[in-house]
Amino acid sequence: MGEAPDPEVVELATKIFDLARQGQTEALVAYVDAGVPANLTNDRGDSLVMLAAYHGHADAVSALLARGAEADRINDRGQTPLAGAVFKGEDAVIRVLLDAGADPSAGTPSAVETARMFAKADLLDLFGAH
């Protein structure tokens, strides 16, 4: 067993994950620009991009991707940010992720499978175009 994480580090990480959830892009990218990994993940494998995408913050997603975050980073449940955005109906986030090269077939369920599940024909057409 390793050492317990430093409580101050845990507190800071929690704050950064909250910034992603809340879409506070300016503060979030200030941390990334200062050295926080753009692909930082929480205890469930959710990346900053996943949290921002799931909560509908296209600007935050775009800023993180511009700083090297992975568009297709899969969490511990096999989900991608794109599938999360499809599930939540976040069209602006979907477009940002696709423009960054996100794979609609990645993950379980994939964005394609999620769009089928919710009969979102427009998204299936969009994915086919990518």
Image: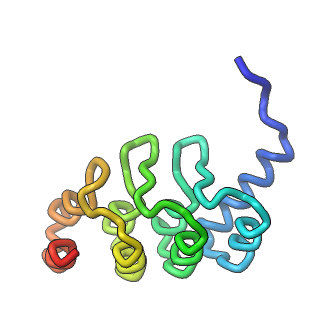
Residue at image position (62%, 66%) is 20
Task: Classify 1 as above or below 22.
Answer: above
Residue at image position (70%, 70%) is 28
Residue at image position (58%, 76%) is 63
Single out the residue that lies furthest toward the top: 1
Task: Classify 82 as above or below 6.
Answer: below
Report the quarter where the N terminus lies. Answer: top right
Instruction: Please give left or right for residue 46 compared with residue 36 in the image.
Output: left
Instruction: Please give left or right for residue 3 compared with residue 125 in the image.
Output: right
Task: Classify 77 as above or below 59.
Answer: above
How many numbered circles does the render carry? Answer: 0
In this view, the residue in front, 21 or 78, is: 78
Report the quarter where the C terminus lies. Answer: bottom left
Residue 105 in picture, x, y percent from top left:
24, 57
Task: Classify 72 as above or below 66.
Answer: above
Residue 107 in picture, x, y percent from top left:
31, 50
Quadrant of res 12: bottom right
Quadrant of res 64: bottom right
In this view, the residue in front, 16 or 89, is: 16
Residue 33 in picture, x, y percent from top left:
74, 69
Instruction: Please give left or right for residue 126 compared with residue 41 in the image.
Output: left
Residue at image position (76%, 73%) is 30
Residue 70 in picture, x, y percent from top left:
48, 60
